[in-house]
Amino acid sequence: DGIAGLGEAPLAGALAAGSIGGTSAPLPDPPGFHPAQGDAYRACLGQGTHLVWGPPGTGKTTVLKRAIGDLIARGDRVLLVSATNIAV
């Protein structure tokens, strides 16, 4: 209810509707990534809106650091949000 009440906010609307996702980039896993990290990395470099979530110690920061660096290197704009300031 809270997200849907934000009104004209496309990302909030997509979250409320459960329509987050898209297509993953057809790329190999970066060296040292396990399969789930590779999936998250490819999603970040693909099309659409994706959320990266996982328990502590699963490599989220490692994946995002690599993905954001690669996105910026190819000229894309990046919006990174976090529930805490530790990751940002």
Image (tube, rainbow, N blue to C red):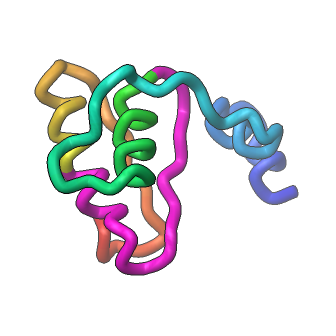
Q: How many marks?
A: 0
Depth check, front residue: 42 or 48? 42
- 3 up-or-down from 29: above or below: below
Quadrant where the C terminus sits is: bottom left
78 horizontally vs 18: left or right: left
Q: Residue 13 occupies which quadrant of the picture? A: top right
Residue 56 lies in the magenta-colored region: yes
Residue found at the very far right of the displayed protein? 1
72 horizontally vs 50: left or right: left
Residue found at the very far left of the displayed protein? 73
At 36% from the left edge and 78% from the top edge, which residue is drawn? 57
Residue 14 placement (x, y as % from top left):
71, 35
Residue 62 lies in the magenta-colored region: yes
Q: Residue 76 occupies which quadrant of the picture? A: top left
Residue found at the very far bottom of the displayed protein? 56
Quadrant where the N terminus sits is: bottom right
At 33% from the left edge and 56% from the top edge, which residue is drawn? 34
- 47 up-or-down from 49: above or below: above
At 80% from the left edge and 58% from the top edge, which residue is drawn? 2
Residue 36 placement (x, y as % from top left):
44, 53
At 66% from the left edge and 30% from the top edge, which residue is drawn? 10
Q: Residue 16 occupies which quadrant of the picture? A: top right
The magenta span reads: 47-65
41 horizontally vs 18: left or right: left
Residue 20 placement (x, y as % from top left):
66, 36
Depth check, front residue: 27 or 82? 27
